[in-house]
Amino acid sequence: MHSHLRRKSTTVLAFALLASVVTGLPSAAQAQEVALTTVQQPNADRRRLSPDQVREVAPALEQYTQQHLYGEVWKRPGLSPRDRSMVVVAAMIARGEAPALTYYANQAIENGVKPAEISETITHLAFYTGWGRAMAAVGPVRDVFAARGVRAQDLPPAFGALQPLDLANDTARATGSNQFATVSPGTVAYTNGLLFKELWQRPYLSQRDRSLVTVSALVAGGQAEQLTYHLNRGMDQGLTQAQVGEMLTQLAFYAGWPSVFSAMPVAKKVFEQRAGKGAGK
């Protein structure tokens, strides 16, 4: 019985989302009224509350959501809706907020993120947020893919040709990890091998986008001390200072102000160092 209701609900969800999208981003009210999965599922946490339901508990929260989050932040010009969706998907995974992915993965696809890129983001972030959080993301995203008719052949394969890396900071990465060879040789071996010589070389997500979701996950997870290398790497691959700034603005709403303010001193130092190197050329 539950499987029949689930199939029916995902179909209804797909048509509701397609009908609600006019410019690639649903209106604020529509965004909250579209169910994340279905209220008929046993897990009541996997549904989205309507604006009226939020107002019954926190009217000010609903006002801020409509006026500032959907009405302003998502429309800011410094970062595309597509990139904002990737930032939020990464933040949801990093923070263990997988149920929200049924809505945000749908929104990401509407904003131009390919299902294959969402799939590869989950795989990538298993290494940066832990296997448990990545596995938790699979269920909600599977519902989205099923409703949209995404097939296995539309997704990145488990094995395939790798693309070589040519990164200015790769020597710094190797030096930084190898200093711990006597502490945890297994970790260093997997870092230099599996992580950087396989995962990062998979061609199904651009180097820029891998950095985008990695930095987003680190900020959302409160791991600012890991940002210096990954911010530099991302900017070497095309992320601009303005885009990083907008990424932090987006994350303030989805990861909280403390996480972002912990990250901003690191970002500021990276920006200043890179500006100094540029001036010294």
Image (spheres, rainbow, N blue to C red):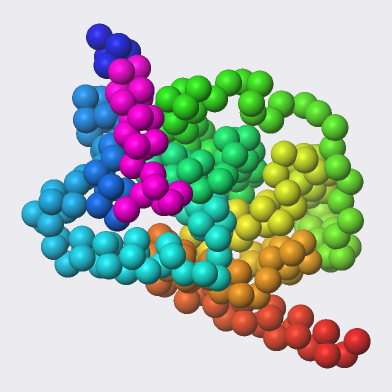
Q: Give the range drawn in magenta.
A: 6-27
User: On the image, which quarter does residue 208 sit in?
Assistant: bottom right
State the count of labels.
0
Q: Is residue 202 visible?
A: yes
- Point 35% across, 17% down: residue: 7
- Point 77% across, 39% down: residue: 202
User: On the image, which quarter does residue 199 sit in?
Assistant: top right
Residue 7 in magenta stretch = yes
Vertical placement of 207 versus 251: above or below? above
- Point 56% across, 46% down: residue: 112
State the residue in front, 189 or 74: 74
Residue 49 in magenta stretch = no
Vertical placement of 91 versus 256: above or below? above
State the residue in front, 120 or 74: 74
Assign the C terminus to one quadrant of the image: bottom right
Magenta stretch: dominant secondary structure: helix
Instruction: Name the spot of residue 21 as percent of width and height, x first.
Output: 39, 44
Left or right: 28 as drawn, with respect to 77: left
Instruction: Name the spot of residue 250 as percent of width and height, x first.
Output: 46, 65
State the residue in front, 270 or 75: 75
User: On the image, which quarter does residue 256 sit in?
Assistant: bottom left
Residue farthest to the left?
56
State the residue in front, 125 or 33: 33
Left or right: 189 as drawn, with respect to 230: right
Q: Can residue 97 be seen in this view?
A: no
